[in-house]
Amino acid sequence: MEFIGIDFGCAVGSLRHGKIPDKDCLLPLISKLLGYCIVAASTTVKLPQILKILKNSSVRGLSVVAFELEVVGYTIALAYCLHKGLPFSAYGELAFLLIQALILVAIIYYYSQPVGTITWIRALLYCAVAPTILAGQINPVLFEALYASQHAIFLFARIPQIWKNFSNKSTGELSFITCLMNSAGSMVRVFTSIQEKAPRSVVWGSVIGIATNVTILSQIIIYRKPHAKVEKKTK
């Protein structure tokens, strides 16, 4: 009994006999279901951030470099998972996150006018190189090195934003909902990656995601409190 790549046979069989499915049956099933839940949720995870920017017509407090590096990281991660032939439930969200991240960067560019020459060069360089990486048309050894570097890329994508938040004592237009969904997704992905027997580097990528996303989420909570108090005093 299989549906969208998920085998419900052992679980249904156990329940029919009035038994609770054993661990070897239940954990892979839960992993697959959670994996597809992450993929489904990823289709809108950056939408709150996009809508917040459009609503306020502002990118105040947002680090352009951080969002650019995020696009590079998603591109490498997606290409690697495709190259390794992992099941869609183990990486599907990367495709949707990449699309939304590209839209987000385009919006940030629009509200950051005038965009400098160096920024345009970075954008054109990405457009030239990304198709080759996604197609897997690079040396396998270089591919492994590139994927290993994407963890550092995601880490450095978050550091400029974390530092900017700390320096400004404000998170500007960062969306709490998007950061919360990113944190939750990284936590669940650690479990699903282990169950899907994904490479250890994939698991470590999710661990780094938990650490950085939770840090930014904490900053949003911490730096919003003073503003709330000021508003109460002025009323």
Image (cartoon, rainbow, N blue to C red):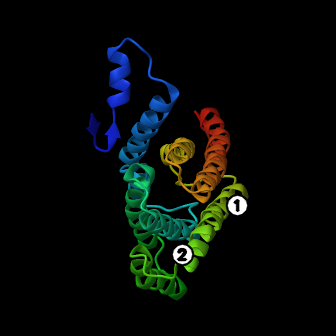
In the displayed structure, does residue 88 sit left or right of residue 73?
A: left
In the displayed structure, does residue 172 sit left or right of residue 88?
A: right
Determine the image quadrant of residue 233: top right
Circle 1 residue: 163
Determine the image quadrant of residue 100: bottom left
Circle 2 residue: 143
Image location (x, y in percent) of residue 85: 42, 61
Image location (x, y in percent) of residue 53: 43, 57
Image location (x, y in percent) of residue 49: 45, 53
When the figure is inspected, residue 176 is found, relative to residue 126, above or below; the finding is above
Using the numbered discs, state the Cα–Cα distance from disc 2 to disc 1 in whole angstroms: 30 Å
Regarding residue 78, the answer to whether it shows in the image is yes
Nearer the observer: mark 2 or 1; the answer is: 2
Image location (x, y in percent) of residue 111: 44, 69
In the displayed structure, does residue 99 sit left or right of residue 226?
A: left
Going by the numbered disc 1, the residue's amino acid type is Trp
